[in-house]
Amino acid sequence: MKECKIHSVQLVLAAIVLAAWVGASYAPAQEPTPPYISVGQVDASPGASIIVPVYYTPDPKTSISSFTAEIEFVSNNLLFEDASEGVVNENELKITNSLTTSNPDEKGVKRSKLLLSVGLEGKPKKGIEDGLVAYLMFNLSAEAKPFVIKLTPRIVSAEDTQRPPRKVVNLAARPGSVAVLSADVTPEMSCFFFTH
């Protein structure tokens, strides 16, 4: 009888440890510490034109006037078209971009790197505001299969609003994604703009 109780306790403890491990595995990614940029998460059907938002969350202690990020993604079925200004710092924000694409690897996978620069024109006294800084426009191939295409950003450089500007080294980046749905599923419009 004593062995049976010990065995039951061990099973309960094992179940608790397993539940904690599974819960940790599926826990949402923790928010980075400001300042950081985050790339949106979008659902799309094959053949769709897609808009992926890029958001900026400032640190009240450090005003940033510009940043450049490199966003890498598998581009066999996801074609980058262009980037445009978001809604913050109206008429002051300038966006530039360039794209490089690798040759297919041994598995036929092509990767692209989008270099996105966001900056305030002139000599700004306040930094980039909290919110939507850019829209990234893509086309998804009609042949795309259900799959999640990760959009992985890396900060290349950032500067503050001081004169002369100083480098900002603590700007973080949170990845986004394009989830390719089955051809017969229509994504909800809210996913295009507000998921981040």
Image (cartoon, helix red, strand yellow):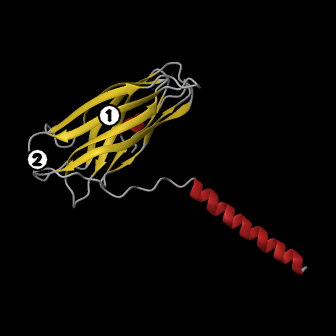
Q: Which residue is mark 2?
A: 124
**Which quadrant of the figure contains the C terminus?**
top left
Please say if 3 is above or below 146. below
Say which of marks 2 and 1 sits in front: 1
Q: Quadrant of residue 11?
A: bottom right
Q: Is residue 193 left or right of residue 131?
A: right
What residue is rendered at 78% in x and 74% in y? 9
Q: Position of residue 83 (x, y in %)?
A: 29, 30
Q: Is residue 111 left or right of residue 35?
A: right
What residue is rendered at 57% in x and 53% in y? 26
Q: Quadrant of residue 117?
A: top left
Q: Is residue 17 left or right of residue 104?
A: right
Callout 2: 10 Å neighbours few (<14), some, many (20+)? some
What residue is rendered at 47% in x and 53% in y? 29
- Amino acid type at mark 2: Pro
Q: Which residue is more in the foreground, 177 or 96?
A: 96
- Amino acid type at mark 1: Leu
Secondary structure beneath dot 2 equals: loop
What residue is rendered at 68% in x and 61% in y? 18
Q: Position of residue 125 (x, y in %)?
A: 10, 51
The tally of labels here is 2
Alpha-carbon distance for marks 2 and 1? 23 Å
Callout 1: 10 Å neighbours few (<14), some, many (20+)? some
Give me the disc on residue 55: none
Q: Is residue 154 visible?
A: yes
Q: Quadrant of residue 30?
A: bottom left
Q: Which residue is more in the foreground, 195 or 151?
A: 151
Secondary structure beneath dot 1 equals: strand
Please say if 62 is above or below 131. below
Q: Which residue is mark 1?
A: 115
Residue that sits furthest to the bottom in the current view? 2
Please say if 100 is above or below 154. above
